[in-house]
Amino acid sequence: MFVWLLAAMTFAVSIGIPRGFNVTTLLIFLCSLGVPFLKPINHRIDKQDKILIWTFFIFSVSFMAFALCDSFAARGLDKPSRFLLVIPVIFLLLRSKGPQEWLWYGVTIGALLAFGLALYERVLMGFARADGGQVAIMFGDTGMMLGMLSMAAAIFFFAQKRFSWMIIALAAGFAGVGTSILSGSRGGWIAVPMVGLFLFWECRDLLGKKRLYSVFSVALICIVAAVAIPQTGIQKRVGEAVSNIEHYLAGSQTTTSVGLRFDMWKAAINMFESAPIFGVGESQMQPIKRELAAEGMINEHAVPFNHAHNDYLQALSTRGIIGFILLMAMYLVPLKLFLSKLRQYKDNWRIRSYAIAGALIPMCYMDFGLTQAMFMHNIGVIMFAFPIAFFWAALRWAEREELAKLELKN
């Protein structure tokens, strides 16, 4: 039970309490070291469990191998090691029966706390962008993901006919989106229509046509209102992006947020072309960018950034085709596993809710990765790997309980 409390707390304190995710994930990892001493259970690790575990292992070890071959610097092992450290956590959760639904309370509380902190920073502290002590983009994107997971929580509570918690979870969903808006993290906003359509499609049978149209209409009204109201800052941030692009294409101003990203992407593509198989390595990014700046290909202000602000181009430029394939496997393998459960359980909404939440994590990251190198940040790695482990274990326990019920009936 304690480990499931820690899992729920990881979501609850993730960004609402600055760097709270570090404490809870460290504690749950320390708990996982006791797995060999746990009482054996009848449930075995199945093929799909092994696929997920091997995906984490291969990605982590490969990432560390690239880091060692690049510069032999121990600091390059830090973030990829998180994917390795989550493996014993998967074993622990798969062997520890507990109240898996606590995860829903965790994501709901986490989204609400994050929004409260974002409001405090923007309204009372006067920050231009809420950041929660993190990089503003990471804070906003994590808040967005908590909001999307809260929508999955609302689906769970609706299916269970627990309407009070459903309303709270829906409020948390909008709070998570609001956190992203207050952070000014434009890249994460693309997730709203993409993930929204996925949620509507998967819930069409649960809600029915009439409710589905009603929910869709309310969501659409909220989106239009958020864009239309100047105080949200959406109009301003979108307008800035359009203006930045126009100035960059005209060559009149390239030091804007978007302009510098374009130059970082241009440099990343250049690096990939020079070393397409294994990439140039992270240690060579800035020296190469300095050369490109000296040749006038990119603005010198793009040189200090230590990543490409794009996960796909970061992988291609520093680890080549090999690194890109590994990155896509890290996204797509967990996504495929969760989606396979959605196809397998068409009417069991307890299992489907966990599957939807698990699928949302790589879906969100695939969007966030378009404008940010998520895995170059500690919070980006932890809030990807550990939540996938949490929801996969919760789904597997729900499956086991369903199987036990069927055996009793027979």
Image (cartoon, grey):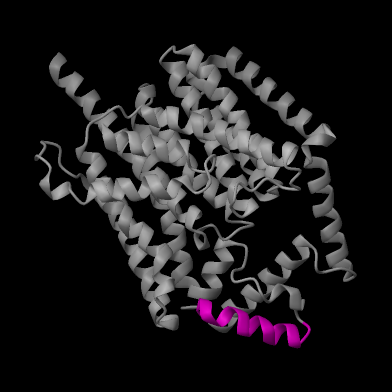
- Residue 253: quarter of image: bottom right
- Residue 258 visible from this viewpoint: yes
Residue at horizontal 74%, vertical 83%? 293
Residue at horizontal 39%, vertical 75%? 74
- Residue 339: quarter of image: top left
User: Outermost residue toward the front?
Assistant: 125
Q: Nearer the viewer, residue 405 or 157?
A: 157
Residue at horizontal 30%, vertical 27%? 99
Quadrant of the frame with the N terminus: top left
State how many labels appear. Answer: 0
Q: Nearer the viewer, residue 112 or 235?
A: 112
Q: Nearer the viewer, residue 377 or 346?
A: 377
Predominant secondary structure, magenta span? helix
Residue at horizontal 56%, vertical 68%? 314
Horizontal and vertical percent position of residue 268:
62, 73
**Left or right relative to 105: residue 397:** left
Q: Which of 219 and 104 is in front in this view?
A: 104
- Residue 59 part of the magenta-drawn span: no
Quadrant of the frame with the C terminus: top left
- Residue 336 visible from this viewpoint: no
Horizontal and vertical percent position of residue 353:
42, 28
Stretch of the chain drawn in magenta:
280-296
Horizontal and vertical percent position of residue 232:
77, 36
- Residue 288 part of the magenta-drawn span: yes
Horizontal and vertical percent position of residue 236:
83, 45
